[in-house]
Image (cartoon, rainbow, N blue to C red):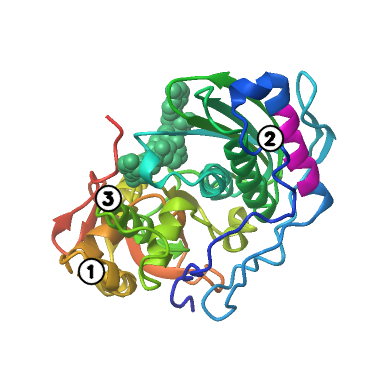
Amino acid sequence: MPSTPNQPEPTAPQPSNDVAPSDATELTLKDVGEDGVLEQIFSVLQAQSAHPPAQPPADPETHPTSASNPVAGPGDLIVGPGDDAAVSHTPGNLVSSVDILTEGADFLPEWFDPYRLGVKAAAQNLADICSMGANPHGLLFALAAPDGTPVNTVRLLAQGLSDEAARGGATVIGGDLSSSACLTSTVTALGFIDRDLVPVTRSAAKPGHDVFLAGTVGWAAAGLALLFAGVRLGDDPHLDPFIEVQLAPRPDYESVQNLATWASAGIDASDGLAGDLGRVARASGVRIRLDETAIDRLAEPLLPAAEHLGTPEAAREWVLGGGEDHGFLVCAPAGSAPVGWTRIGACEEGQPDVLVGDHSAADSAYKHF
Ligand SMILES: Nc1ncnc2c1ncn2[C@@H]1O[C@H](COP(=O)(O)OP(=O)(O)O)[C@@H](O)[C@H]1O
Ligand SMILES: Cc1ncc(C[n+]2csc(CCOP(=O)(O)OP(=O)(O)O)c2C)c(N)n1
Ligand SMILES: [Mg+2]
């Protein structure tokens, strides 16, 4: 039976290879020009494909995701970055998604960390592909940045993106550059699903299904609250893991391998567990009842962060309402989830809703506007 969800390892992801920052370290995008920036990005991506990524140590007890055994992606890249478009030899049906990270809405300059932002840009897109039951293949990296941005910032971004892509079984296959008043990274992810498999959509939950979680929920929200309160990585080792998940979420890609063979409906929890399940409930026409004991269990590890901020009740709120960990939520027949998944509730007949006790939480998803 599925047990405790995987805990993120507290170790920070680090740039994986020994690419020298080059003599362009102090130079800006304006100094080197568009071709110069591209050269820098390509050198990071090429070094990446020459060296398999070094992985932060994972504790197999708490983090079954085998970081040292990246998920193998489908398809072969025939033409990579540097031409008008990438060309891939691909199996299966195409699965595609895009997500934006923008200064102000998704991170603040006060805690901007380019390597980790690259990881986050890859993770949030790979999670969308995986939650459909597909295998990631490639990422397209569109970057708009002020012309005074250091070139090394872009190198680190590309490296974080590329390292996390490798962890998810994908590669960076192209992108675009533009100048802008503030930094915006837009990543498009492409993946594939076997033609004989049914994609895991939001609309296929049925009364009688159990609801399962792989990965974490609430850690990124705790990290965000800490960052807003002025806490930074390195200030307190007990708080670092939360900030780490906010800055560089690392979804449990291993658990979603073969998802389409056993799960019916699914979503990655980017906007909050209850709100995202609300989307599943509405799309499927089911009522989801969450197990309060499971929610309390998920809240427990967040208590150090909540107590640090003087708001112990926040732990539960982060679990139900916090996004950005990119934990995976699926609805599937009881008993069908493999090891690594935790049962957190069930689907039943009724008005579409997400119930925690008597409380409806279906409309709590994070909204940009
Ligand atoms: N600007 C847009 N144009 C077309 N479709 C969009 C746009 N923005 C969002 N969507 C679609 O709306 C749905 C919900 O988007 P979103 O909330 O961003 O999903 P997710 O949390 O999976 O990233 C997705 O299918 C997405 O493709
Ligand atoms: C400065 C700042 N404010 C707020 C947040 C919180 N936040 C931003 S986006 C988001 C939800 C997910 O983002 P979205 O871009 O909508 O991802 P999607 O649902 O499309 O996958 C949250 C909780 C943050 N990370 N940084
Ligand atoms: Mg989106």
Disc 1/disc 3 C-alpha distance (Å):
13 Å
* Front position in the image: 293 or 83: 83
Q: Secondary structure at mark 2?
A: loop
Q: Alpha-carbon neighbours of circle 3 within 10 Å: few (<14), some, or many (≥20)?
A: few
Q: Is 217 situated left or right of 37 in this image?
A: left
Q: Which residues are magenta?
A: 38-48
Residue at mark 2: 24
Magenta: main secondary structure equals helix
* Front position in the image: 348 or 18: 18
What label sits on residue 266 in the rendered view?
none
Residue at mark 1: 308
- State the image quarter where residue 22 is shown: top right
Counting from the top left corner in percent of width and height, residue 352 is at 26, 46
Q: Alpha-carbon neighbours of circle 2 within 10 Å: few (<14), some, or many (≥20)?
A: some
Quadrant of the drawing holding the C terminus:
top left
**Residue drawn at (20%, 62%) of the image:** 314
